[in-house]
Image (cartoon, grey):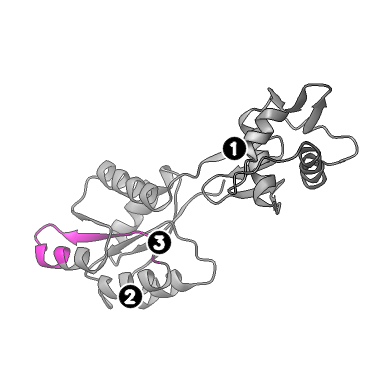
Amino acid sequence: MEPLRILLAEDDPLIVEGLSELLAREGFVVESSPTQSGAVELALRPHADFALALVDLTLAQGNGFAVMNAIKAATPQVPVIFLTASDDELNTVTGLSMGADDYVAKPFRPRELVARIQAAIRRARPERTTLSLGPITIDLDRAYVEKDGEEVMLSALEYRLLLLFAKNAGKLVTRDMMRNALWDDAGAFVEENTLSVYIKRLRDKLEDDPAAPRLIVTVRGLGYKAAPDGGRA
């Protein structure tokens, strides 16, 4: 996983140096600019992908409010933390009312700043709930399925069936369990032969070799079983 990147808009070179070293030790990559225009240019660069912006309110050239507005307009999901003077209550309140996610007063305590940064990023990037089945990854929040990094397009019933296997990896999945998983909104049961059709469709989309399935295998007379490792060596 690539390290998260932080945009720092700060015109004090000592603070820039200290923060860059501190955040590098925490696993972040810092890109900085001492000016409003430079920070905005960094923030709006294609594929900038900053996890968070640290913005000094009182820049020598420009101001932090304009930097925050540009960031929020282009990437509203990116949290912004203001760095403020300890006695600058008015600007602090103004920044928060304009959409800043947090503020830290100078001189700040390094560990507190890191904790604030990590908390803001967690709020902005909640962990997704996923299930894995061999090379298959299922993002439950988005109902998104991928195999080896490539999206797999499934119908609603195929998706429900895959969830059943993923939640019961290594266990026997009976046809009655499959019927319950595929119970449709109209209240009709799925016919017996239809179950075999959906198993074939899943295998066609998920197996390396559908003719010799290793991910969803048949347990004769009982049902099916999904291999937790996908049957790969």
Q: Tell which circle, 1 or 3, labels the residue nearer the N-terminal end.
A: 3
> From the viewer's perspective, is the residue at label 1 or at label 3 nearer?
1
> Residue 12 appears at what percent x and percent y?
27, 64
The structure residue drawn at horizontal position 26% and vertical position 72%, both measured from the top left corner, is: 65
**Left or right position of 122 against 152:** left
Q: Tell me whether the residue at label 1 lies in contact with that at label 3, contact meaning CB atoms closer than 8 angstroms.
A: no
Q: Which residue is mark 3?
A: 77
**Left or right position of 90 against 50:** left
* Three-letter residue code for mark 1: Leu
Secondary element type, mark 2: helix
Q: Tell me whether the residue at label 2 lies in contact with that at label 3, contact meaning CB atoms closer than 8 angstroms.
A: no
Calculate the distance from the C-alpha at mark 1 to the C-alpha at mark 2.
Answer: 43 Å
- Magenta-colored span: 76-93
Q: Tell which circle, 1 or 2, labels the residue nearer the N-terminal end.
A: 2
Residue 131 is labelled as 1
Calculate the distance from the C-alpha at mark 1 to the C-alpha at mark 3.
Answer: 25 Å
Q: In which quadrant will I find the C terminus?
A: top right
Other-residue count near label 3 (Cα within 10 Å), few / some / many at <14 / 14–19 / ≥20: some
Report how many numbered discs are placed on residues in the image: 3
Q: Is residue 223 magenta?
A: no
Residue 36 is labelled as 2
The structure residue drawn at horizontal position 39% and vertical position 61%, both measured from the top left corner, is: 78
Q: Is residue 172 above or below residue 197?
A: above
